[in-house]
Image (cartoon, rainbow, N blue to C red):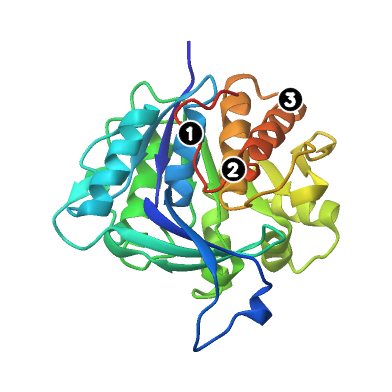
Amino acid sequence: MAIKVLCIGDVMLDVVTKIDVMPSEINYGSDTPSTISTHGGGAAANVASWLTRTSASATIVGHVGNDAAGSALASEFDALGVLHNNLVVDTGHSGVVVVIVDPTGERTMFPDNGANSGLHIGDLPALQGFDAVYISGYSPLDPLSLPGIKAMITKIREANLPIYFDPASVGGMKEVPISEVKSWLQLMDVLLLNEEEAIYLTGEGDIEKSLDLLLKDCHTVVIKRGSHGAIGKSRGQSAQSVPAFATEVVDTTGAGDAFAAGFISQFAENKDLNRALLVAAEVAARCVAIIGARPRVGTKI
């Protein structure tokens, strides 16, 4: 029986601008040739979308505006098989992220949260039947959504569902006191973050020491290391490391979200850390090989 995952957080439209020069060579105040495309985005939405390409099923809790972008995002969820309810709201425009991708595949984001602000407890569906919950850190980092996310976490913990949490970017975390972010970690079961975020939260540059510090709050911690793979550890067990899958990197947008989806699809079912890391790395490799943060409808893992 397929694992059912509830994904809570941001649903965005990504406007991806691929440039052939490094950012320092952009002709500011003038023209710089580029290739521009639009794609579904948002961390929680990306995780939900990639989950549907695994053996798991996904339901998204988030908002889009009653506009053209919102219609496109809802249609993409339907095509991928992501379940949703009360997705379209009449207040606010759909969230948009402008993503600049340089020749190395590195991306820089300019987000406008739009209708994603203001998630509330009424958005949470009945929890019966779900096996796990993923929460994107972009939601609690939004002051208008923080009370609603905290109320949701209380309900989720009462239902004894494991919570997988990605604290989002260092840039986002710097907008709130670090003590506030750290207080959220104690409410989570599994923490998924990258090296920069681990260093920011612990002040420790050594990866294994960061793992041990973060394990004081969460039962399992996974640190994503990009082209160097990933390392994870659960309390009372030894650390597990996996390499990144060899692939041609086209666009790193959404790679961490794809990794999270692959990890959750396995770990929620059998708690096999090494296997979950391997599947996560495989799904992330599929993501970086395409433009955009979401799988295509025909993508298989």
* Residue on which the image places disc 2: 290
Inter-mark Cα distance, 3 to 2 = 24 Å
Q: Amino acid at mark 2?
A: Ile
Q: Earlier in the sequence, mark 3 or mark 1?
A: 3
- The type of residue carrying mark 3 is Arg
Pointer 2: residues within 10 angstroms few (<14), some, or many (20+)?
Answer: some
Q: Residues within 10 Å of mark 1 (few under 14, many from 20)?
A: some
Badge number at residue 296? 1
Q: Residue at x 42, y 44 (%)?
A: 45
**In the rendered image, which residue does mark 3 sit on?**
275
- Closest to the observer, 19 or 193: 19
Disc 3 vs disc 1: which is toward the camera? 1
Residue at (52, 56) in percent of width and height: 184
Q: Which mark is residue 71?
A: none
Instruction: Establish if 160 lies above or below 141.
Output: above
Q: Position of residue 277 (x, y in %)?
A: 72, 33
Q: CA distance from mark 3 to mark 1?
A: 24 Å
Q: Are marks 1 and 2 in contact (CB under 8 Å)?
A: yes
- Closest to the camera, between mark 3 and mark 2, is 2
Residue at (31, 55) in percent of width and height: 148
Query: Disc 2 on helix, strand or loop?
Result: loop
**Label 3–label 1 contact, CB within 8 A:** no
Is residue 225 visible to the viewer in this orientation of the structure? no
On screen, 204 above or below 153? below
State whether residue 185 appears in this view.
yes
**Residue 253 horizontal/vertical position (percent):** 57, 53
> Where residue 285 sits in the image (x, y, percent)?
68, 38
